[in-house]
Image (cartoon, helix red, strand yellow):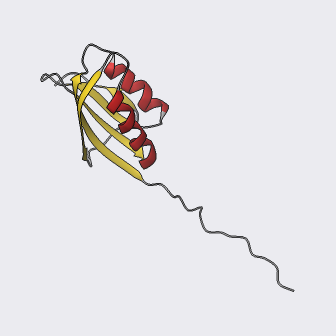
Amino acid sequence: MNTPQANTDPPQSTSSTKTVRAVIKGRVQRVFYRNWTVENATQLGLKGWVRNRRDGSVEALFAGDSDKVQEMEKRCRRGPPAAKVTAFQVFPCDDDPGTVFQRKPTV
């Protein structure tokens, strides 16, 4: 009599982790964009940061589950209601995202 054996392999994950740096241009300063980004990234469980740049753009680093990072990219293309995003660039990145998502000072 054959008895079924328990599967001792760890569960297979279909998603992977991803880290990207994003540069967002348009009317993205003085419109709650950074705080909105912190709220959305935290909601998605991402790590990283967001900051204003002196050239008027916003820069962010997003790290976490690949699907969640992709969702954050989609959200950032729209931004909060008062924002008007005119350009959105994403670059693969291997910087350390830290342990939480935070707002950083302007550079």
Above/below status of 51 relative to 65: above
Which one is nearer the viewer's eye here, 75 or 99?
75
Image point (83%, 84%), residue name? 2
Q: Residue reaching furthest bottom?
A: 1
Above/below status of 57 relative to 68: above
Query: Going by the image, does 17 lie left or right of 4?
Result: left
Q: Please tell me in which quadrant of the rendered image residue 63 appears.
A: top left
Above/below status of 98 relative to 7: above
Image point (65%, 69%), residue name? 8
Q: Where does residue 78 sit, x and y in percent of width and height? A: 35, 28
Q: Where does residue 33 sit, x and y in percent of width and height? A: 32, 21
Image point (48%, 54%), residue name? 15
Q: Please tell me in which quadrant of the rendered image residue 100 appears.
A: top left
Quadrant assignment for the C terminus: top left
Q: Residue reaching furthest right?
A: 1
Q: Where does residue 39 sit, x and y in percent of width and height? A: 43, 24
Q: Where does residue 50 sit, x and y in percent of width and height? A: 29, 28
Image point (33%, 46%), residue name? 19
Query: Total number of numbered labels?
Result: 0
Quadrant assignment for the N terminus: bottom right
Which one is nearer the viewer's eye here, 23 or 19?
23
Above/below status of 55 relative to 100: above
